Image: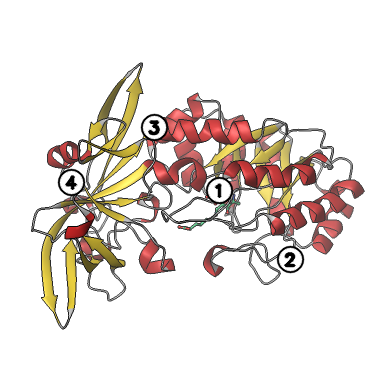
Amino acid sequence: MLNDSIHYANGSLHCDGISLAQIAERIGTPCYVYSLPRILHQLQRLKAAFQAIPSEIHYSAKANANLDILRALIQAGVGIDTVSGGEIWRALQAGCPAADIVFAGVGKTKAEIDYAIDEGVGWINIENQQECAWIQAAATRAGRTQRVALRLNPAERAATHAAIATGHAEAKFGLSATSIRELMQRAERYPALDFCGLHVHIGSQLSEPSATGRAIDAAGNLLAEYPQLATLNIGGGFPVPYRQDSELSTVEEWVASLQPYLLRLQLREAVKIEPGRFLVADAGVLLTRVLYCKRQLGQTTLIVDASMSELLRPALYGAHHEIVPLNEVEKASRETMQVVGPVCESTDVLLPQVALPPPQAGDLLAILTVGAYGMVMASNYNARPRPAEVVVYRNGAESGWRLSRAREDWRSFYPGESQDP
Ligand code: LLP
């Protein structure tokens, strides 16, 4: 979606005053472009929405682990929520103090737990009882006490796409309230673990907050039983509009409706939040170039140089991302078409129906709201190089841009592969 940072100026699409066509000409396509000012603006909005609720933010690096984005958020005082050894390493590489890292995940390996504890991560979110023994062993060896939060599965089905709901009883995530009570009864078996919080995350892109409210209440019942649990981590899930006509609540409304639930918990420590999508989604665009236009059997198909390899969400979830021309044209001169990528899969459709100006090979388009779960889910399918990433930054009143990550080269796809015949 267009916003204060991604906007048309003099008929062409800009990011914070920088011409996106100019970036496409210099860097080539497909290419992700991210607005750092927009990300920091969203961070300020979220902080303001939580003003009346003592809170601490851990940015969910799974949404976008671009180094410049991580650095900007860490410099703005945000911790990082990680789900693998690789993400912990990445957060440290970006300069995050280990104490500000949360390590979560439904299937942490022993090696990842050892690494997390050796590096000194602040929190580990626990999803099953067996993890406790591994954390106990690693923390004892390191001579540390490890703060842990227990992830509650509140048996609440979130109002979102089925593929990104995580809080229902059949989901693989979290511990039931009964499992948490069993674990708390055996807590003294794990003297190196400081059981000091609960965690609950019922899904992403939550269209309305009532299920989250009920999940917070369910967590509240457990917090009341175990006074050593001083805080609650409510995860991410803050919704982002992907369509111009979206009727989703704003983040301000969303947080306001959860505020009574959070305040009545009377937590001793700040509530933790793990926003991913909200901070980065609408700061990102994917620039792509028209390769061919095919008119047959009553339909127009536009084949562009971006595909499901660079942006998987439409193929995987049927997710909607608007596509706009870099050069604005009269609405009257548009034609309805499907936009597809070159990958050999029928699901490689970026947008099944869109009205665009009659295309010419070489025209530039922007796929909008791709800052979250775009590049991180890109692959080398069909031996396609992952795209370049550019960041636009502000330096005082001036905007500038730089190549943040170069496009991959297919000659580097197979490192470590044996060359033996
Ligand atoms: N915390 C936990 C425990 C999570 O599992 C997630 C996302 C987040 C925080 C961040 O959630 P957010 O604020 O971004 O909603 N690939 C999917 C989204 C998967 C989300 C996974 N967990 C997509 O493209 O929609």
Mark 2: secondary structure: loop
Display colour scheme: secondary structure
- Amino acid on which disc 2 is placed: Ala
Examine the rendered structure and indicate whether residue 339 appears above or below residue 288.
Answer: below
Q: Residue furthest left?
A: 361
Q: Which residue is mark 1?
A: 112
For label 1, being within 8 Å of ligand 1 is answered no
Q: Which residue is mark 4?
A: 327
Label annotation for residue 17:
none
Q: Which residue is mark 2?
A: 155
Q: For the residue carrying disc 4, how many other residues have a C-alpha within 10 Å: few (<14), some (14-19), or many (20+)?
A: some
Indicate which label's residue lies in the foreground, 2 or 3.
3
Answer with mark 1 or mark 2, whichever residue precedes in sequence: 1
Q: Position of residue 1 (x, y in %)?
A: 38, 49
Label annotation for residue 36:
3
Answer with mark 1 or mark 3, whichever residue precedes in sequence: 3
* Mark 1 → mark 2, Cα distance in angstroms: 28 Å
Front residue of 199/90: it is 199
